[in-house]
Amino acid sequence: EVVMTQSPATLSVSPGERVTLSCRASQSIGNKLIWYQQKPGQAPRFLIYGASTRATGIPDRFSGSGSGTEFTLTISSLQSEDFAVYYCLHYINWPFTFGPGTKVDIK
Amino acid sequence: EVQLVESGGGLVQPGGSLRLSCAASGLTFTDQYVSWVRQAPGKGLEWLARIANKANSYTAQYAASVRGRFTLSRDDSQNSVFLQLNGLTTEDTAVYYCRIFVSTHANDYWGQGALVTVSS
């Protein structure tokens, strides 16, 4: 089973700042990585797939990069609506597994 | 508009059973794989299971944490998937989401979630 880790666990940020979140896989997953955003009481929101392709309707301040075992989600200028928990998910093989998440909160 | 609606959640005693349903509309259901993901209170997301489409023999796959206790099935005539939960423990307390990824246009759809509480 591929184990996903994320860092940091929590990130305190001011609006307008650039944010970089990291996700690491325990073995190579190519580009089979999804990023989700989740707010309290809501289902996850699909942000990025194939490690770097934005989903429909996702603002271009969100970008994903990486391949193999190291991945990054970057938010170029954090908006108030971006405070949330971010999860990475691999889908290279079964079982799919999520990282533990990074909480982005207000500094 | 694509909609996924889960139902069947509730309070159950340890050792008990529940059957969750996910009803889909607004998409060609027969072509889709359907997955279930859960989230325990205050915790992260856990991918539980998925069931393939008819073209892939309705094959079901499970995470180790639920294999042997949870069973997936589907009824394409009702555009529905069912997750049978047996042998429930307090660790199964969570919101259970169904999810469909439509690869033809790379859209990802989730239901609103069904809360399962396992408690005596």
Image (cartoon, coloured by chain):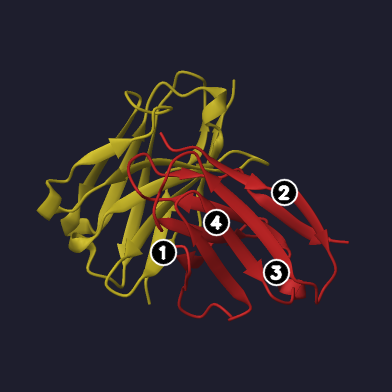
User: Are tags 4 and 2 found on a single chain?
Assistant: yes
The kind of residue on which mark 3 rests is: Asp
Mark 1 or mark 2, which is nearer the start of the sequence? 2
Which one is in front in this view, the residue at disc 4 or the one at disc 2? Answer: 4
Identify the residue at horizontal 67%, vertical 71% (top origin).
A75
Which one is in front in this view, the residue at disc 2 or the one at disc 3? Answer: 2
The local crowd at label 4, few if under 14, some if 14 to 19, many if 20 or more residues have their Cα within 10 Å, is many
Task: Tell me: A48 left or right of A9.
Answer: left
Mark 1 or mark 3, which is nearer the start of the sequence? 1
The kind of residue on which mark 2 rests is: Pro
Q: Secondary structure at mark 4?
A: strand
Which one is in front in this view, the residue at disc 3 or the one at disc 1? Answer: 1
Identify the residue at horizontal 64%, vertical 40% (top origin).
B43
In the picture of the structure, the residue carrying the numbered disc 1 is A50
The kind of residue on which mark 4 rests is: Phe
Q: Secondary structure at mark 2?
A: loop
The local crowd at label 2, few if under 14, some if 14 to 19, many if 20 or more residues have their Cα within 10 Å, is some
User: Are tags 3 and 1 found on a single chain?
Assistant: yes
In the picture of the structure, the residue carrying the numbered disc 2 is A8
Whole-percent x and y of residue A2?
A: 44, 38
The chain containing the residue under callout 2 comes to: A
The chain containing the residue under callout 1 comes to: A
Which one is in front in this view, the residue at disc 1 or the one at disc 4? Answer: 4
